[in-house]
Image (cartoon, rainbow, N blue to C red):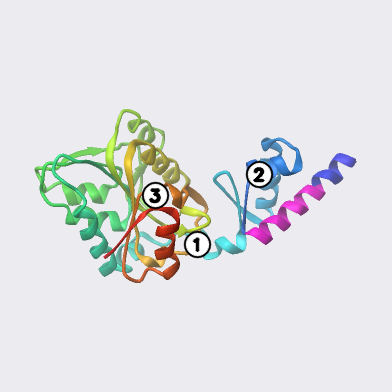
Amino acid sequence: MAATRDTSQRRLQISELVRQHGSVQVTALARRFGVSMQTVRKDLRYLAERGVMARAYGGAIDSHVVGGAMSEPPYEAKRTSHLDEKRRIGLRAATLVKAGDTIAIDSGTTAIQLAEALPNIDVTVVTNDFNVLAALTPKNNIRIVMLGGELRRKNMAFYGGLTVEALDALHVDRLFLGVDGFDLERGITTHYEPEAMLNRKMVEAARVVVAITDSSKFGTVCLHRIIPVTDLDTLITDTGAPEDIRAASQQFGFELLLA
């Protein structure tokens, strides 16, 4: 009975910590309560099933913080929203690419604008996005390495174990990383767990990590974390970027390019 009371008390305290801080991490909770990480994960799963919080990579997020960001917008809506900003960001990102480079382009609607803007020069592009492939196909000087796997029609990109494994033998000069959520405390996040897994593998394979996002994504937290903001080398966004993002580039040491 004492163990049950201890478990109930611990879960109540975890709920309160999430409410106070917005998010919690498994390792920190395990240390705080003197229990195993497996026990903490069970607690978080129990609380997530009751709507107290949303499970995230390495921890959990307050369900109120995640809010509407949990539901992924339809692909066509994402493709047409903030289109002018995405085109400017794509053009600015393309100026970073030089002949002889090997780059990775993540899936996403801003990534498509980068692919459209890339000059027809001697570069190698690694991607898992069908529409990036379609945009690059007419540019016959660009070598394309398509990451296979299972097609997710919701955003026309490939994911899964095969996709991740294909990156094992690859190294790229620069990764252009699309963003669903960008929060200074909770990092760069996405709606879809296999995408987060693939993106983390892309980050490992890249010498330089460049996030490309329009300013509507700032302050949004999605369920699955890719990387903390401190892992970024460069952020390319539009001139609507809020002041805290501009200040953060100094604080966290990433280059900020406004398009």
Q: Which residue is mark 1?
A: 69
Kindly identify the residue that appears in the image at 42 percent across and 47 percent down.
231
Q: Residue 232 vs residue 37: left or right?
A: left
Secondary structure type for disc 1: helix
| 12 relative to 27 in the view: left or right | right
Q: Residue furthest right?
A: 1
Q: CA distance from mark 3 to mark 1?
A: 22 Å
Mark seen at residue 234: none
Q: Is residue 95 magenta?
A: no
Mark 2, other Cα within 10 Å: few <14 / some 14–19 / many ≥20: few
SS at badge 2 = helix
Q: Quadrant of residue 175?
A: top left
The amino acid beneath tag 3 is: Leu
Is tag 2's residue or tag 1's residue first in the polypeptide sequence? Answer: 2
Mark whose residue sits in front, 3 or 1: 3
Q: Earlier in the sequence, mark 2 or mark 3?
A: 2
| Magenta stretch in the rendered image | 8-21
Q: Which residue does the numbered mark 2 point to in the structure image?
A: 28
Q: Which of the two residues, 119 or 156, is positioned nearer the viewer here?
A: 119
Residue at 66 percent across and 41 percent down: it is 41
Q: Is residue 11 above or below residue 39?
A: below
Vertical order, 127 against 171 (above or below): below
Q: Amino acid at mark 2?
A: Ala
Q: Is residue 9 above or below residue 42?
A: below
Which of 109 and 99 lies nearest the eye of the viewer? 99
Nearest the viewer among 10 and 162 is: 10
Residue 191 in view of the camera: no
In the image, residue 12 lies in the stretch drawn in magenta:
yes
Give yes or no for contact between labels 2 and 1 (Cβ–Cβ under 8 Å). no
Q: Amino acid at mark 1?
A: Ala
Mark 2 vs mark 1: give the one in front.
2
Which residue corresponds to mark 3? Answer: 232
